[in-house]
Amino acid sequence: MQTPPAPSSGTRRGSLACVGLGMTLGSHLTPLARSHIEQADVVFAALSDGVVEMWLERMHPDVRSLQPYYREGKSRLKTYRQWVELMMAEVRAGKRVCGVFYGHPGIFAWSPHKAIETARAEGYEAHMEPGISAEDCLYADLGIDPGRFGCQHFEASQLLFYERRIDPAGYLVLWQVGLVGDRSLARFQTGSAYRQLLVELLARDYPLDHEVIVYRGATLPIEKPRVRRLPLRELPQAPLTAEETVVLPPAQSLRPNIAMQQRLEALDELEKAGDVA
Ligand SMILES: C[S@@+](CC[C@H](N)C(=O)[O-])C[C@H]1O[C@@H](n2cnc3c(N)ncnc32)[C@H](O)[C@@H]1O
């Protein structure tokens, strides 16, 4: 079993490790993440469901769930700030703290980044340990290689709140579509009218009959990934949970950049002639 690095001299007592548990209970936890959990004085947990939390409790006697801080009508940002403060209070008390988050602790997750930044700014040892995220599972389960056509990831609401450039020649992965357009940050779900706005925006780059994939990776070993394919126009009416990610496959073929290819060709010629720096 690997051991986490010991605090370097010069840092204050108390430390923070934010680790990922992966998506599927029992099979995604890395030995290093497990080691951080087992060697912590206190463990905070933000996990996908209660069963996963019970599994974590078998690894450590002091697991404190962060889930009760969520509340309908309360800003998630407030909740996430509380999470940071809860972890930091124990770090400042000189404890070795481990924050355990489902998936990857640094992917679409505000608190782990903020807690690590805060701990380091105050002179504590702080570290993030990656985990297998929904993104990783999606590539495996849907047979997508992001390197083939490129792949953009957006938090769905960000597409509505800001002017962004979508490239329909690559994959488009949309996170948190279930609560798209929630400006209050206080709802767990938004309705079909909100998703209709998202569809209208996407329709600038995709035909309405373009296939979208609604994907849910397995969180329990007895589950199978759930993959639903439907035309873009049906997305507003499709039942969608908070645990699903939406993927739009490419709608256009890659267009060659003739000008750049010609410049590369010219460079190749120069190189052949031994004339390139
Ligand atoms: C706050 S983010 C957390 C992501 C997580 N840190 C990770 O590494 O996958 C929540 C979003 O992750 C995606 N997600 C969560 N669970 C999922 C699952 N089981 N399958 C597919 N996507 C999931 C959804 O887009 C959801 O809205």
Image (cartoon, rainbow, N blue to C red):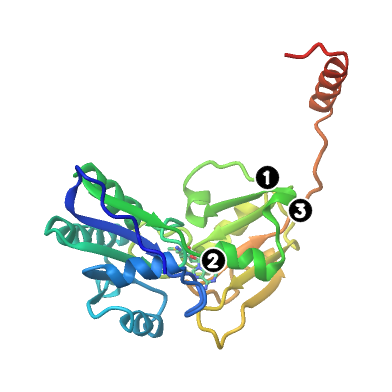
The answer to whether 225 is drawn above or below residue 185 in the figure is: below
Q: Which corner quadrant of the image does residue 128 belong to?
A: bottom left
Q: Which corner quadrant of the image does residue 75 belong to?
A: bottom left
Q: Amino acid at mark 2?
A: Ala
| Earlier-in-chain disc, 2 versus 1 | 2
Q: Residue 102's mark?
A: none
Frontmost of labels 3 and 2 is 2
Q: Position of residue 164 (x, y in %)?
A: 56, 42
Q: Position of residue 170 (x, y in %)?
A: 71, 49
The answer to whether 216 is drawn above or below residue 19 in the figure is: below
Residue that numbered label 1 is attached to: 167
Camera-side residue of 224 and 210:
224
Measure the alpha-carbon separation of dots 2 and 1.
22 Å
Element carrying mark 1: loop
In the image as oriented, which residue stretches furthest toward the top?
275
149 left or right of 9 in image: right
